[in-house]
Every structure is written in C-alpha cells, then in structure tokens.
Amino acid sequence: MPTLYNRIANQNLDRLSALSDGVFAFAMTVLVLDLALPAAGAVHSEHDLWRGLAKLAPNLLMYLTGFLTLGIFWNGQQTQLNYIERSDRDLTWIHLAFLFTITLMPFSTKLLALFFHYRAAVLVYWFNILLPGVLLYTSWKYVSRHDMIRAETPPEIRAAICRRVFIAQILYAVGAALCVFGSLWSVAFIFAVQLNYAAAPRLPRRKRADAPAV
Amino acid sequence: MPTLYNRIANQNLDRLSALSDGVFAFAMTVLVLDLALPAAGAVHSEHDLWRGLAKLAPNLLMYLTGFLTLGIFWNGQQTQLNYIERSDRDLTWIHLAFLFTITLMPFSTKLLALFFHYRAAVLVYWFNILLPGVLLYTSWKYVSRHDMIRAETPPEIRAAICRRVFIAQILYAVGAALCVFGSLWSVAFIFAVQLNYAAAPRLPRRKRADAPAV
Amino acid sequence: MPTLYNRIANQNLDRLSALSDGVFAFAMTVLVLDLALPAAGAVHSEHDLWRGLAKLAPNLLMYLTGFLTLGIFWNGQQTQLNYIERSDRDLTWIHLAFLFTITLMPFSTKLLALFFHYRAAVLVYWFNILLPGVLLYTSWKYVSRHDMIRAETPPEIRAAICRRVFIAQILYAVGAALCVFGSLWSVAFIFAVQLNYAAAPRLPRRKRADAPAV
Amino acid sequence: MPTLYNRIANQNLDRLSALSDGVFAFAMTVLVLDLALPAAGAVHSEHDLWRGLAKLAPNLLMYLTGFLTLGIFWNGQQTQLNYIERSDRDLTWIHLAFLFTITLMPFSTKLLALFFHYRAAVLVYWFNILLPGVLLYTSWKYVSRHDMIRAETPPEIRAAICRRVFIAQILYAVGAALCVFGSLWSVAFIFAVQLNYAAAPRLPRRKRADAPAV
C-alpha cells in the first residue's frame, strides 16, 4: 500500500521538521537571554551605560558565533530533509540524536563565552560541532543506503551533501587543533570558517542554482 | 457536509501537531538549560575546568534520559496522529492532558537528577512516564471506538499501537518496582528500556516497512 | 485577482496559526518551570522528600488551572481560524492582541498562585481571562461583518461560536464577582467552569458532530 | 529540472517561516517573563498588592512596546515571504540575520525598561529596530534583483513593500533623533509610530484589499 505509507512517512518528515524548527528557534533565542544587563546600581551617567554596554561586546560576539553555528546546522539539516522521500524509525532517531546535540549548543556557547581562554572550553565547543556533523553525515549515509532519497535528486547533489559535511568538519577539526597554540586561535579560526559558510563569496549564480542551498 | 467537516478536522490535527511539536521542542531544550556552568571563581587551570565538566557527567546522563523519554513519547504520539482521520473535542482534550504531563517532564527529570538516591524521586519520575502512556492508550482506544482511524490502516497496525504502549508501560512498571532494591536499580532499568526503544536491534527491514515507526 | 489574494491570505492564516501555536506551547511549558524543587539541604529522608513534594500540590493545582485556561483559549482560537476564509491586517492585529493577553497568562497564574487569598490577584486573573475572550469575540464579529467566514460554514455554527464565548465570559464574571465572599470562592468557581469546558458531560455524539469543537 | 527545484525551494520557505514563527513566539513570550511579581514579604493587604501591581505599569507598557515591535516585524517578514516564489542560500542567510536581530529584541526592551531615561538605551533600542528594517529591505531588494518574486505579484505591491519599510524607518530615525531633547520624547514618539502601524486609521477598505497586509 504505497499511498498509505507515503502519506504517513511524509507527515513524519513534516513533524520532524516542525520539532526541529522549534528546537532551533528556542536554542537561538535562549542564547541571547544570557546577555546580562549592566547593573542599574553601577550606572550613574550616559557614559557609565555606554561603558557597561561595551563590556558586553565579547559576549555578544560569542553569541553571534553560537547563532551562526545553529544557522549552519539548521540549513544543513533542512537541505537533507528536502531531498529525503520518507522517514522511518531509525532515521527519526538519528535526527532526534542530532537535535539533542543542538540543545547542548547553548551550554557549550556559554561555556566558551565564560572560559574562552581555556582549551577545555574550546574542545567542548568543537565536540559540540563535531557531533551534529557526524549525525548529519550518518543520516545521509543511511538514506543513501536505504533508498530513501527522492528519485529526482541528481547524483551531483547526492555527492555534494556528503562532501559539504566532510569538508566543513575537517576545517573545524583544524580549528580545534589550533588550540595547541592557544585557545583564541581556535575561536578565531572556527568563527572565520562559520562566517565563510554564512556570508562568504560563492560560485557564480548560474552554477549555484543547481547546488544544494546549504 | 463531509468536505467541510474533513477539512476542518484535518486542520485541527495539524494544529494539535504543531502545538505538540512546540511543547516537545521547548521541553527538550529546557532540560539542558539547567546544566550549570562550572563556577568561574573555582576554575584556575585547564585541570580545574576539566574536573568541573566531569562533575556534570551524571547530570548530563540524567538529561539524556529525559530527552530519550520525550523522544519516545513524541514518536508515540506522532505515530498515532498519523493514523487518525480527524479530531473532535474529546480527542483534543485527551491530547492536551497528554501535553500537560509532557510539560511536567522537565520538573520530574530535575527532581530525579537532584534526588536520584531517593525512591520518592524515582516514583514521581515513573508516574510521569505512566501518565502520558495511559493517555496515549486512552487516545487510541477512543479513536478505535469512535471510528476515527484512517480507513486504510491495516488491522495489524491497529493492534500494534496498543500492544506497544502496553508492553512499554509494563517494563517501566517493573523498573519502578525495582526501587524496593534501591532507586539506582530503577533508574538503570528504565534507562535501559528507553535506550532499547530508541536504538536497540530491530526486526529485519522488510518486515518493519509495514510496522508503525514508533 | 482572487487566486493571488486567496493564496496569500491563506498562507497568512497558516503563519498566524503557527505563531499562535508557538506562543501557546511556550506559555504552557513555562508555567511548570516555576515549580521549584524541594531544597536539597532540607531533604534528609524519603519522608522529607514526600513532604516537600506534597507542599507543591497547591502550586501544581494552580498551574493546572493555568494550563486549562490556555487549552480552552487555544481551542477557541483554533475553532475560529478553522472557519475563517482569509486574513487581513486588522484581523491579524486582533489576533496579535489576543496573543499578547496569552503571554500575560504565566504572570497572572503565578500571581494567583502566590496571592490566591487576595482579591486583587483573583481580579487580575479574571481580567486576563476576560481580555482574550473579548478579543476572540471581536475577531468573530469582525470576520462576520467583513464576509471572511468560509462560505460553507452553516449558520448554526456562526451563532454557536459567539454564544459560546458569551456564556463562558458570563460564567467567569460570576466567578470573579464571588470574590466579594472571599477569593477562594472565585478560584474554585472559575476552576469548576474550566474543568466543565475541558472534561464535563457533553451533548450526545450525533449532535456534536456538527458543532464547533470548542 | 524546475519541478524538483521548486518543490525544494518552497519547502525551504516553509521551514524558514516555521523557524521564524518559533523565534518570534519565543521572543514575544519571554518579554513578559521578566515582569517580576510583587515580593510576597512586602504585601500585607489588598492595598499593598494593588500598589505593587501599579508599580509594574511602566514595565508592562515597555513590554507592550516590545510586543508591538515584534508584531510589526513579524507582519513585515510574513508579507514579504508571501510574495516570494522560492528561496536560496543568500536569502536564507539574510533572513537568519534578520532573526538574529529579533532575538536581541528582549535584551533591548529590557534595557529600555530599566534605563529609559538614558539616551544610550534609546539609541540601542532604535538600532535594534533599524537593523531588522535594513535586513527586510535588503531581502526585498535581493528577491527583486534575482527574479524570485511570484510572477502574479502586481507592480504596485512590489513598490509598496519597499516604500513601507523606508517610511517606517524614517519615522523611527526621527524618533531616535528626538532623544537630543530627552529620551522620553523618543520613547513616546516611537511608541506612537508603532501604535499607528498596529491600530491607527487606514485606507478605505476597497483600496486596502489590494495592498499588502503589512
């Protein structure tokens, strides 16, 4: 009964997407809630307030990093789900595990914001980037193996999605390795990689039209 | 007027799903917010930070348990809703009651994380697994009795959904009963049951294709 | 251009629903976050923990009331939106105002939980039930006047939706008025009204099939 | 392969909408969570409680302002997305940047509520209105340039969306500039502009039917 099955499976994907959007939306918003206001008692002039706000700049930057990370993984997951025909129990649990690593992101980001000069914080943060990457890779391998990719998906996209996760994770690993020279090198490198994925120069437009919108 | 009614009822199910996804997404994310960072004042070296993080391991495990529980119930509810044709006022309220028990989950999980060596905490946690199970069972009985299951649903799926809730709840009850030997036995047993539902060996693939993706 | 307009308007309703579900999901979940765990320092035995949990019972009941209120209004809004054909700017803002009153619900509920023996708390809570009721009524009057109800909606449903809001609000007002005898009378009466809307005896099933699933 | 691409792109827009609704829903609800209850210790009579609640009025007004701002931007983004045919990577990141500025809104609003008599707080708040406005403008310019607007969109709507963002931002800038006379002038002016966009007199209905429901 293909009709019944397809409808159910598709609905599954819809609800998985909705759950994911909820988790991402919450994680993205909650990051900024930790930006503490300047203490009212310490502010007696415009100058005091500007200075209090300026002190928040490093935190704000760290939260921007967290948001970028979440945005990149949200894009990555969405692109995959767009090309997947149906879901099953295993795939659902791979994505639930992926979402679990996403819910840890506010913790890792706060840890990095507070202890950015410690290698431990950088490594935890990197591990929190590695895990969802591995799970997205697992998810794509799983759907490839079990014939769950939409039939119309051109082969170059199938390869591109794997390659994309792979290259990104190598760059992040390089970033993490840089912490032998100092944790700030790692933070700066990882931030640069993320900015690149979010906003950097891209292939000419004609080409991109066929590429996954990762 | 079947057309009007169907459209409205379906939309009802869509909004019930959306509300449920929101509640689950929030409950899943909020669990991890309670992971307290190591106190900055107590960290003077990489070693201190690693030790501070290691101390979080039991909490992290407890939160993983909470996430597993939420994931299992999310899957269970979703599977049911996929096979349900339309909603009505009673069914909506059964699912709202189900969602109420879900919103209690972060409380029970925190309680268990803080007092895992007390039987009271284990029993409260088990009760918080029992309640949504009973409500999902009630929901399925209700739609069976009122002819609200999609016509194409094969009979073996109708039975499987009931059996599934039933067996899981018996296992959880056994887990809860183990707390006469000590609360940690209960926690370990319930965690094992949950891991089994999320990741354990399954029927061969051909068979599973027709089974509900619980 | 009716095709363009309809598509856009429908999508508007979809996003309004999605935003509403998000707001409700968050408000429902956040209520329970305020259930404070028993203090670890005060718990030295199973008995202490049970007693600590028992002390939470009144709070839990109050939160259940808050959840019921949110569930009732979620149902009320959903039923209306199901019968509405399209949205426009005014209707959107009526529903945004409605959502604003919903976001105030966790505040009013906490206020009532903390000060349930004060009339002021009861009146604020009642006002927080009155406002969304008035806005749902305004919304239905607006769509009736501007011909925005789905054409197939039978006249008895059009009347039923108004009547429903009206009767409920009269009962809540009676509940609020009872606080001249003591605030607990109000709380008990309002809770009873809400339980009635959620779970009480209903019309025989045949009849209900045509009535709005409020 | 236009069919494949369209389906994927549309799904992208759906998930972008869902993520946005989640972020907005959370930001809207979280604003009110900061409304602190009157301290139980300071309340000994009905009178005390009413006075404690009255003291919250300025905060409540500030939160209403925040909610209005979020509502206006939610409407603005939704209107754009309704007229957009498909998404690509750049557009997605423009909207993620937009959402980042939205997540900052609870921070800016709390800052303004606490320091409304300081110009710094007003300017930060204004900047937090300017940024999402600029990003919505960028988004519309981008889809205009890359032919991503739905073909049936009439030219007057294309122009209207730009004009709308432009005029609103000029009014907000005027409001911000008023803070040379005192920060309260700015707050009052910006609040008046927002109320106007949410609830003020509008074009006669016939005309409005063709205009974007911003």
Image (cartoon, coloured by chain):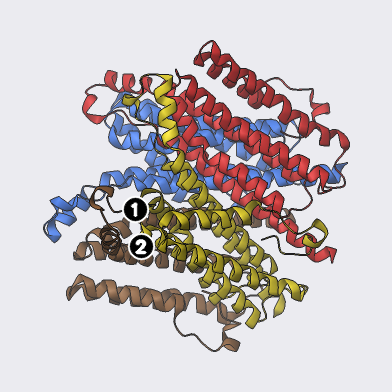
Chain colours: A blue, B red, C yellow, D brown
The residue at which mark 1 appears reads as D34
What SS does tag 2 mark? helix
Q: In the image as oriented, which residue stretches furthest toward the top?
A: B181
Alpha-carbon neighbours of circle 1 within 10 Å: few (<14), some, or many (≥20)? Answer: some
Alpha-carbon neighbours of circle 2 within 10 Å: few (<14), some, or many (≥20)? Answer: many
**In the rendered image of this protein, does residue D146 appear above or below residue C31?**
below
Q: Nearer the viewer, residue A168 or A119?
A: A119
What SS does tag 1 mark? loop
Q: Residue at x 57, y 58 (%)?
A: C193
In the visual, does C90 lie left or right of B131?
Answer: left
Q: In the image as oriented, which residue stretches furthest toward the front?
A: C181
Q: Nearer the viewer, residue C142 or D170?
A: C142
Name the spot of residue C120 as percent of width and height, x first: 36, 61
Would you identify the image quadrant in which residue B72 lies?
Answer: top right
Quadrant of the image for the N terminus of chain B? bottom right
The chain that hosts pointer 2 is D
Q: Residue at x 70, y 19 (%)?
A: B201
**In the rendered image of this protein, does residue B89 appear above or below residue C159?**
above
Residue C43 visible to an observer of this rendering: yes
The kind of residue tagged 1 is Asp
> Pointers 2 and 1 in contact (CB under 8 A)?
yes
The residue at which mark 2 appears reads as D63
Q: Which mark is residue D118?
A: none
Q: Nearer the viewer, residue D156 or D72?
A: D72
Name the spot of residue C38 as percent of width and height, x first: 38, 31
Name the spot of residue D39 as percent of width and height, x first: 27, 50
